Image: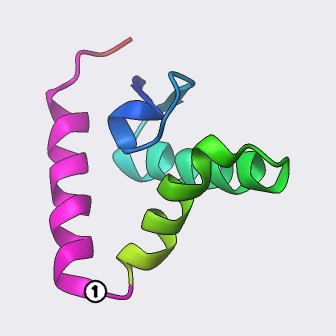
């Protein structure tokens, strides 16, 4: 298991997301952003919009995804 924070994934807070793979952590971040915005947390609006909009530009999205996977791989195990 490895851990990345919301902030490390482009968000505004330090909530920790843990997972065995980068994809698990990215999915946890996606759920967190959606829940925060639904709860009225405007601090997460920009990050949620970026996450949603990122996939409209596949080249940019893959750059973010690959950089996140590399950052995850570079982390020590918990």
- Decide whether residue 7 is among the magenta residues: no
* Residue under the point 26% across and 61% down: 65
* Residue under the point 59% across and 47% down: 44
Q: Which residues are magenta?
A: 56-76
Residue 21: quarter of image: top left
Tag 1's secondary structure?
A: loop
Identify the image quadrant of the C terminus: top left
* Residue under the point 19% across and 75% down: 60
Percent of width and height locating residue 36 = 73, 45
Q: How many marks?
A: 1
Residue lying furthest top: 78
- Decide whether residue 70 is among the magenta residues: yes
User: By what rule are the colours in the image chosen?
Assistant: rainbow
**Drawn side of residue 10 relative to residue 17, left or right:** left
Percent of width and height locating residue 63 = 15, 66
Q: Is residue 76 above or below residue 34?
A: above
* Residue under the point 45% across and 50% down: 26
Percent of width and height locating residue 8 = 34, 33
Along the line of sight, which residue is nearer the eye, 22 or 59?
59
From the image, give the main secondary structure of the stretch colored magenta. Answer: helix
Disc 1: which residue: 57
Q: Is residue 13 above or below residue 40?
A: above
**Drawn side of residue 61 relative to residue 49, left or right:** left
Q: Is residue 70 above or below residue 66?
A: above
């Amino acid at each position: 298991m490895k851990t990345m924070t919301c902030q490390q994934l482009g968000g505004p807070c330090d909530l920790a997301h843990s997972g065995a793979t980068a994809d698990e952590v990215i999915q946890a971040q996606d759920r967190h952003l959606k829940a925060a915005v639904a709860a009225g947390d405007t601090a997460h609006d920009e990050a949620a919009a970026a996450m949603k909009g990122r996939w409209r530009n596949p080249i940019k999205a893959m750059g973010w995804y690959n950089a996140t996977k590399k950052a995850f791989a570079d982390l020590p195990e918990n």
